[in-house]
Amino acid sequence: MLRYTVVQGGLGLLAVRRACVLSRFAHSAPKSEYRPIKKVMVANRGEIAIRVFRACTELGIRTVAVYSEQDTGQMHRQKADEAYLIGKGLPPVAAYLHIPDIIKVAKDNNVDAIHPGYGFLSERADFAQACTDAGVMFVGPSPETVRKMGDKVEARTLAINAGVPVVPGTDSPISSLQEAQAFAQTYGFPIIFKAAYGGGGRGMRVVREYEELEENYQRAYSEALTAFGNGALFIEKFIEKPRHIEVQILGDKYGNVIHLYERDCSIQRRHQKVVEIAPAFQLDPHLRDRLHADAVNLARQVGYENAGTVEFLVDKHGKHYFIEVNSRLQVEHTVTEEITDVDLVHAQLHVCEGRSLPQLGLKQDKIRVNGCAIQCRVTTEDPARGFQPDTGRIEVFRSGEGMGIRLDSASAFQGAVISPHYDSLLVKVIASGKDLPTASSKMSRALAEFRVRGVKTNIPFLQNVLSNNQFLHSTVDTQFIDENQELFNLKPTQNRAQKLLHYLGHVMVNGPTTPIPVKAKPSSTDPVVPPVTMGEPPVGFRDVLLRDGPEGFAKAVRAHQGLLLMDTTFRDAHQSLLATRVRTHDLKKISPFVSHNFSNLYSLENWGGATFDVAMRFLSECPWKRLQELRALIPNVPFQMLLRGANAVGYTNYPDNAVFKFCEVAKENGMDIFRVFDSLNYLPNMLLGMEAAGAAGGVVEAAISYTGDVSDPMRQKYSLDYYVKLADELVKAGTHILCIKDMAGLLKPEASKLLVGALRDRFPDVPIHVHTHDTAGAGVAAMLACAEAGADVVDVAVDSMAGMTSQPSMGAIVACTKGTKLDTGIALDKVFDYSEYWEVARGLYAPFDCTATMKSGNADVYENEIPGGQYTNLHFQAHSMGLGNKFKEVKKAYAEANKLLGDLIKVTPSSKIVGDLAQFMVQNNLSRAEVEERADELSFPLSVVEFLQGYIGIPHGGFPEPFRSKVELERGKTLHIKALALGDLNKAGQREVFFELNGQLRSVLVKDTVAMKEMKFHPKAQKSIKGQVGAPMPGKVLEVKVEVGSKVEKGQPLCVLSAMKMETVVNSPVAGIVKAVHVTADASLEGDDLILEIEE
């Protein structure tokens, strides 16, 4: 009972205290009707609408959004409790200017108050009056005050009456061009047009010469009319290089007016503020006091209530001039909130309800500045193209956040569509700190964290502003951007992930594309298979292998009388000549003939990395099925494959168990001999492959990759001693066969004798196999020299698939050795039949045939050392990259790239690395010296960077220095990508492709090239055709100033475009006669859409 009494007493004391407080408020403020606001509509869109909604939610007020037909997907309508369509059938901007619709929605839905935001109707007295007449509170000054302040001429008169200095200008809005001309004659140039009923840079144009007067008058009038519904203008003398300082004011219904200090808005572009700072940096204290006093006095004189801004220009002598009052909330109000800790929107709503500033605790002596705040307006504009607005879909959006950062945004999210209809503002970034340098560093850090893909933004430009010494340590004026052109030295973004997704999406939508530089068509004639003997094929070396195992097989090879051949026709020959495009179908047809007539072949090479790559990417075949089917058709001849050591048949190192399992499954499916090599002769990688092949029960053929020239005493990096020592290690490791892999065809006859002779002397019992290419045309001579020096096996290809970058001719070797101790035992007439089949079959692959781009072998391979298997592919790649006419330069660059990388052994994948660097050099017109000098700033191909990181092993002699140390070896960046789905075709001929990237949903829009052929689109201007004039940006055509047959001068206005409420005049690039006009007024255009054609 006692406890209950105490509680009752406590409640009683609280009630008394609250009554006393209310009584004190009643005595301290004039009596006024207090009308609580329960529901607020925002007659605006975008981030300002969301800003007001958030404030309302904090105060327990229900919110209502309005939106145009073009804004159905905008975030502001989703953030409100209720949302209603306005301006049905009206243009995008006109919808938000349609007062009857807005008032109707407010009345129909019991709205208590309307907040106008900024822009649109925010400074229209007729709108404020319409709200009052409808019994709806207007969150802002009274209609009469809006009228006075919105009419810049009347506001100017009031300022003069209040003793505030003003800039010379017209006393009332002008109504004609003649009045503008008269003012200019009186005061001289420069002058400035300003919209009489709005701000934000709309309807504002500086005129410096008489010749510019008429065009700028028309543009200013049109912009003002579009943005504010009234094209009235007034003129002022333009003050050169002033600071733009504005004072935030706040008044109530009882005559109380305070200021919340000032903001420096001097960093502007086309009169649009870009960066705002509060308080103004290095502002003279006496000048600051005068600005505050003038702003408050002017507001008191007109009985100003609610939030507003008094704007001034400060010239280089420290004199200030009143320019206008913005009777609304400003875009940059955020920085004032950050330094004063006053929520301006809360204050607006409370004042509108009837509360006084003292009741809200807002007294001038209690308002203090705390630190510094900066606002950057991140817009979808391209600084590199004169800040042209960019439109499109945001594919990626990641913001910068953290301590001291505030973000106010609306359309900033992945998937948002940026249209040309409204302002280009994407997000406002506000940074706060104890002083300007601290706030600047936080802002710089936040901007660096942003990732916006799909549309261009001004972020790189803003980053340059924030790092500018004048900005950080001195004062700036309104000419700051124009006078600091280094601000436009923009650092390009890498955008690697999105580029990769676009590529993958293109492949998913349109299929893989291999650019073919020729128009050759496949032959319509199918090859005829030569007659094949009935019954089982003769016994071959595979029978020896199956009976005696790998060791017995090796002994049989070494004991064989005569020269053995390996036929590469089934793989390396068509890789070198036909880009590996030969189908299993054509291989199977000739297989029985090979089995019956070439049973004494050492092996048939038919499998390798390129087989996997092309079969799966281009032929839609299974390489394993190919192996199984060929094995069934050729049971007596050993199959040989290439195994790239630890890389298996790929382009990177795989886990050991994966390599072992691969070899095991390959052996089970019919593979016999594993030719193991490493592109750098890196022994650890080779030993892994040898061990895996041996464990699978296969024949281990360790290959020494050959480069250089052992017969040249001047080239001793890869000397005879180097190769012999490497062979020692391979034989010690247990190789069954020793192979020399001369992938570029560099082994000359004399070098053949030296190398093979030395190996034969060193290893008398180990079979030696030599692989080469015939690029220079000396392949037959070199292979015969190898055989004479003691080689047991050499590589050949059937005659019609031999020569050039392929292997030496089978027929030539067979004929040259016939009747000698090296006799191959192969019937020459069977070689002819075999060759005839392939001669016709080759015609089926004409579009891929190397003879389309090269007509013969070339001895320059001794200089550039391009591997035969790569030579043709490199030629095709050069054509596809637009370097077809520069292949000679590509070959020279290949030699230079090789030297840059330290003179590598060049075979897949090291040959690809050299080729990538060579094409990079030619494409960017770089010499070897320039690459070395600029290595720390160039963005090298990924293959080059990964090589220098040691991804494929350590090259003989180590990595090239100082080149390697200068290249940025970026580590720790891995992209995990999963393809999810493919969308339907949209009206623009695109499909949306969905991915998961590093765990996050991403999507890209990809043009469906097949579907687009059946769709009609506006033609694009061809930049290569001088008289074609294209749209410089997406937008709407306001006016076409010429017609077909018009004579135009260079620089003459042709048409006017409107984008994001700003107007752009498209001028003629040449003098001539208008040949065709492709647009009409009100037409919507995309960037580069063809406007008209001019004939010089």
Image (tube, rainbow, N blue to C red):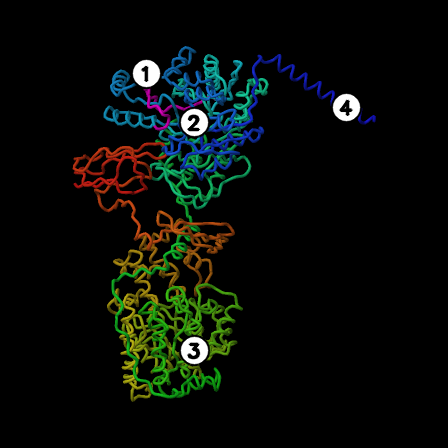
Residue 711 shows in this picture = no
Q: Could you say which disc has been placed on residue 738 in the image?
A: 3
Which mark is in front, 4 or 3?
4
What amino acid type should be assigned to the residue bearing mark 3? Leu
Work out whether residue 441 or residue 24 is closer to the camera in this orientation and state it: 24
Which mark is in front, 1 or 2?
1
Mark 4 and mark 1 lie on one chain; the one further toward the N terminus is 4
Q: Quadrant of the N terminus?
A: top right
Question: Marks 4 and 3, Cα distance to the nearest angstrom?
Answer: 103 Å
Which mark is in front, 4 or 1?
4
Mark 2 and mark 4 lie on one chain; the one further toward the N terminus is 4
Q: Position of residue 215 (x, y in %)?
A: 26, 27
What amino acid type should be assigned to the residue bearing mark 4? Gln
Which mark is in front, 1 or 3?
1
Q: Position of residue 1039 (x, y in %)?
A: 27, 33
**Residue drawn at the location 37% of the way across and 64% of the way down:** 618
Q: Could you say which disc has been placed on residue 170 in the image?
A: 1
Q: Could you say which disc has been placed on residue 8 in the image?
A: 4
